[in-house]
Amino acid sequence: MIRNIFFFLSALAIFGAVMTVFSRNLVHSILYMILCFFAIAGHYLLLNAEFLAIVNIIVYTGAIMVLFLFAVMLLNLNKTKKISLGKVNLFASVISGGILLLVFVAAIVKNSESVTPVQLSQDFGSIKHLGKILFNEYILPFEASSILFLSAMIGSIILIKKEHR
Amino acid sequence: MEELQSTLQTVPLNWYIVVSLTLFCIGTVGILYRRNAIAIIMCIELMLNSVNLLLTAFSAYNGNSDGQVFVFFIMVVAAAEVTVGLALIVVMYRNVNSADVSLLNKLKW
């Protein structure tokens, strides 16, 4: 049963990713990417990372992909003229990506030690447990990430602002 | 909790590694293939997500929650990156009236 759910979610994620890359319409591509992110959130639920599943849906599909859709619709990028991508480009990129995948999979198959999963504690992956870790051990990176967000926000506003002479 | 233990027992860790590596390679193909700047940023997001999945799988199989905190920080960095990247695309659209990266060849040797 769980194995079937795993296969279904994996197939959904890979299908979404492939359609993201190869669909011509940019809006369709973004919608397929949302499908892929939902499948990855399902994987997180399967791995008992419920906090990450919720954050993935809220941040990625809720914020980032909506930002992409806004950018596409505001700039009217969908209406730009079709540029011929070329068969050579397609073959070259698919072959190099396939070789990369081949190397990765060969490296895994070569030293395939079966990992025995450890016994998990009762509150593994829960919001309470993660919050305790985040605010005790990782408090400094957490604060640094807030500064990163602030600088990204200021930087994007400065970039977008029209220059007045 | 019994559900989780049965998930970890029935699905080997290698399968999760293969799935996330496949997603990573699809993202690589997309970056090489697409010419639209927004599509390229989306493929970078796809690669970041595959790494997130891998980190979560490792953290679940090792019983260590630090991997999930790392995934959280990766999401933070991805959000900041997308903000700045889309601002750059808007500026590019103002200058060359398109989001095609092959038009930006002034620095090409």
Image (tube, coloured by chain):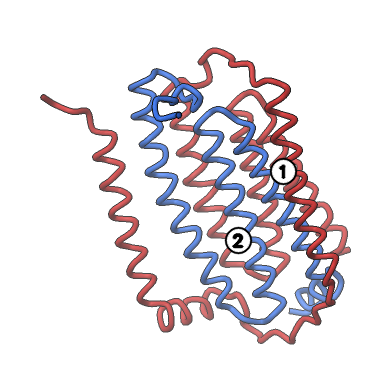
Number of residues whose C-alpha sits closer than 10 Å to that of mark 2, classed few (under 14), some (14–19) or many (20 or more): many
- On screen, residue A135 versus residue A20, left or right, reads left
Q: In the figure, the red chain has which letter? A: A
Residue at figure coordinates x 70%, y 48% from the top left: B25
Q: What colour do you see for chain B? A: blue
Q: Quadrant of residue A52 in the image?
A: bottom right
Q: Chain of mark 2?
A: B
Where residue A97 is drawn, which disc sits there?
1
Residue at figure coordinates x 33%, y 70% from the top left: A143
Provide residue A85's location: percent of width, then percent of height. 64, 21
Q: Residue A6, relative to residue B24: is it above or below?
A: below
- On screen, residue B109 versus residue A98, left or right, reads left
Q: Quadrant of residue B17 in the image?
A: bottom right
Residue at the limit of the structure toward the left, as seen here: A165
Residue at the limit of the structure toward the front, as seen here: B109
Q: Which residue is mark 2?
A: B52
Q: Chain of mark 1?
A: A
- On screen, residue A156 versus residue B18, left or right, reads left
